[in-house]
Image: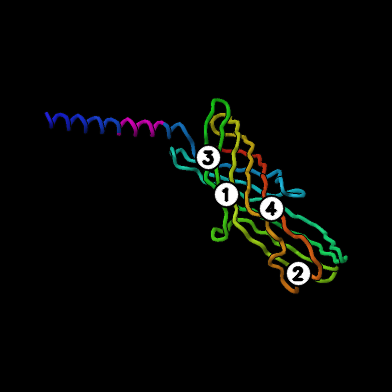
């Protein structure tokens, strides 16, 4: 009786494993390897136009996240005069880069993609602001500020023919406020200026996914 019970348990276990493998195989066959390519059209903290993109690779394996990369860059120009009539002109170029993981969630009509990411110096990502500083017309120097960043994003896509999808995305970049002159070269400032900036914001993208 005991041997029959053990045999029945093994048979159930093997049967469940076999059914599970068939289910995963059929699920994988119904999906594709996808390449995502998006271009940035706006960044909420940028004072003007931006350049940037987001790319990703989607795979059919269940539960394993897909991987992507995001980058956005913009220029901020400002002239500040203090109470003693000292003047400083700043031109800061900020670049934000992240590595992210994401999941595709299918719906009857549209597809939803949700993900998260981060960037830091040891991964050659993060936030970097390179600033050109000109004080009182002639005193020129530079500053290079770096920081880590976290990212959360989603895409809403409209698929066509099971191979092409057009989508709209929003990437929220979060990090602490930075002083864009904190690593100033050369002599100290002659005047007193507030050079702290809050560049955290959202990158809006449009793009396409092509499945193979």
> Looking at the picture, how far across and down is residue 177, in whole percent?
67, 55
Residue 62, picture quadrant: top left
**Nearest to N terminus: mark 3 or mark 2:** 3
Determine whether label 2 and label 1 are within 8 Å by CB.
no
Q: Tell which of 95 and 21 is nearer to you.
A: 95
Q: Which residue is mark 3?
A: 34
Residue 13, picture quadrant: top left
Name, please, the residue furthest toward the front.
Answer: 83
Q: Secondary structure at mark 1?
A: strand
> Looking at the picture, how far across and down is residue 66, in whole percent?
50, 43
The magenta segment is 17-26
| Cα distance between the residues tagged 3 and 2 | 46 Å
Q: Which mark is residue 69?
A: 1
Q: Residues within 10 Å of mark 3 (few under 14, many from 20)?
A: many
Q: Which residue is mark 4?
A: 73
Magenta segment, principal secondary structure?
Answer: helix
| Cα distance between the residues tagged 3 and 1 | 14 Å
Q: Secondary structure at mark 2?
A: strand
**Nearest to N terminus: mark 4 or mark 3:** 3
Q: Nearer the viewer, mark 2 or mark 1?
A: 2
Name the quarter where the N terminus is drawn.
top left
Give the side of residue 142 with respect to residue 22, left or right. right
Give the side of residue 73 with respect to residue 20, left or right. right
| Cα distance between the residues tagged 1 and 4 | 14 Å
| Cα distance between the residues tagged 2 and 4 | 22 Å
Q: Which mark is residue 141?
A: 2
Q: Residues within 10 Å of mark 4 (few under 14, many from 20)?
A: many
Q: Nearer the viewer, mark 3 or mark 2?
A: 2
């Amino acid at each position: 009786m005991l041997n029959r019970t053990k045999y029945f348990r093994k048979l159930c276990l093997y049967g469940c494993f076999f059914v599970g493998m068939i289910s995963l195989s059929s699920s994988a066959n119904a999906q594709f390897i996808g390449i995502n390519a998006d271009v940035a059209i706006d960044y909420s903290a940028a004072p003007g136009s931006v350049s940037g993109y987001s790319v990703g690779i989607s795979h059919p394996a269940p539960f394993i996240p897909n991987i992507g990369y995001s980058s956005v860059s913009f220029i901020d120009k400002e002239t500040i005069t203090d109470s003693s009539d000292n003047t400083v002109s700043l031109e800061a170029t900020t670049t934000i880069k992240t590595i992210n993981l994401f999941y595709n969630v299918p719906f009857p009509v549209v597809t939803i993609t949700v993900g998260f990411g981060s960037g830091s110096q040891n991964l050659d990502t993060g936030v970097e602001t390179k600033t050109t500083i000109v004080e009182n017309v002639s005193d020129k120097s530079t500053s290079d500020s770096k920081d880590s960043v976290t990212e959360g994003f989603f895409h809403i896509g409209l698929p066509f023919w099971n191979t092409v999808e057009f989508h709209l995305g929003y990437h929220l970049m979060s990090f602490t406020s930075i002083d864009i002159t904190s690593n100033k070269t050369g002599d100290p400032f002659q005047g007193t200026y507030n050079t702290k900036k809050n560049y955290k914001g959202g990158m809006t993208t449009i793009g396409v996914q092509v499945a193979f």
